[in-house]
Image (tube, coloured by chain):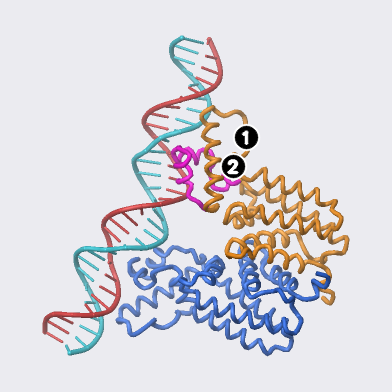
Chain colours: A orange, B blue, C cyan, D red
Amino acid sequence: MNAGTPPPRRRMRADAQRNYERLLTEAAAAFAEHGADFSLEAIARRAGVANGTLYGHFPTRRALLEALMGDRMQALAATGAELLTARSPFDGLATWARAAMVHTTIYRGLGVTLMQAVEDETSELHAACKAVLTAGEELLARARTAGEVRPDVTAPDLYALINAAAWAGEQSSPPQGERLLTFGLDGFRTSATDRE
Amino acid sequence: MNAGTPPPRRRMRADAQRNYERLLTEAAAAFAEHGADFSLEAIARRAGVANGTLYGHFPTRRALLEALMGDRMQALAATGAELLTARSPFDGLATWARAAMVHTTIYRGLGVTLMQAVEDETSELHAACKAVLTAGEELLARARTAGEVRPDVTAPDLYALINAAAWAGEQSSPPQGERLLTFGLDGFRTSATDRE
DNA sequence: AGAAAATATCGAGATAGTCTCAAGTTTTCA
DNA sequence: TGAAAACTTGAGACTATCTCGATATTTTCT
């Protein structure tokens, strides 16, 4: 559906541009249908291009994912910023977390990559993940200040919960993800730990 | 360390028995060090055996895992039964969940297999996973009866939480797993949802 | 326009992993 | 001891990742 972001830098040769876009389109379709581990070789084939061409444009699988998801993740961060004005800080947080989980679920198996990317500075997805993490931190900080979540809940906790819930959702027929996320978020709440 | 369970059925030829055990030993070491996705070919090599021999003994990777973990999972189920007499039903549940998470962490990447196995009747690990699920259900039922957990929390929720927390723990440098499990379990508690 | 320069593409090849199976070897036991 | 049963072997058929020199296409410059 979505053909990805425009050219990376400078100007590309016309044929390169064409191939770049075709690869992105096919990759999006293949990943959506078969998961983020789908064969790059097959994607090149489907795009009518030699696999060397694919590697020329996207040296790593992560580079391809970044091209596919960069914008989307920035958008998610922006949504987080908007939810900073939600009536209830906790609800804003919860709403955003749900959106983030849905986002992670776009390609099966994406969670692993996203979890690694936030710690690995050399990952092409690092910046995007950091932006998401930061958005989460802000929502969390607000809810914390309002006394709605426990003071010891951190942004990495939230990030991990989102990805873990997405992961669980992928593994089970009735989407366990939603439930897990809800339980986790409830565990974040102040009320759950009066005596600790 | 642990060489796995004894022969499967009837009696094996002496050399077969030797190879079977050697494979189990090497697999345990390799999985422990490199994760449950480690190359079966390499395991056969390390065991000084042709790869056809490995496949002869263990038709699938899951079969190998079952041989490696079957007992251990039964033991986990037994631990669950014992914790049924814990002073506090919730603490019994929490203690067991922690043990289950540690158990899942024995080989990196095991969680995926365990989540699939519980739904897939054809998996060699299905029975073992069911036993674990059942143990969880009993602990949960007791805590529910005692009014310590929300009435809508199910055994699959618990199972998913345990595996998801183990998964998260594997992806992050500071072991996020423990924290996630705690938050999730707190989310299971009755007190967290008075008004819902 | 024409040719040189810059930029891309191609696809074979090196490496590695999964899984199968016909042919050969070892063990068992009557 | 020797034949039948039980195992092992390793090559072979696939699939995937990633690299690189040869080849082709596009752009640029005069």
Query: Does residue D2 appear left or right of residue B68 in this picture?
Result: left
The segment highlighted magenta reads A37-65
At 36% from the left and 68% from the top, the residue drawn is B55
Q: Identify the image quadrant of residue B175.
A: bottom right
> Could you tell me which secondary element the residue under label 1 belongs to?
loop
Q: Identify the image quadrant of residue D9.
A: bottom left
Query: Does residue B66 appear left or right of residue B7 in this picture?
Result: right
Amino acid on which disc 2 is placed: Met
Magenta span: chief secondary structure: helix
**Residue A40 among magenta residues:** yes
Amino acid on which disc 1 is placed: Pro
Q: Return the residue at label 2.
A: A1
Sequence order check, earlier mark of 2 and 1: 2
Q: Return the residue at label 1.
A: A6
Residue mark closest to the camera, 2 vs 1:
2
Chain under callout 1: A
Which residue occupies the foreground of this view, A191 or A153? A191
Residue B147 in the image, given as x and y percentages of width and height: 76, 82
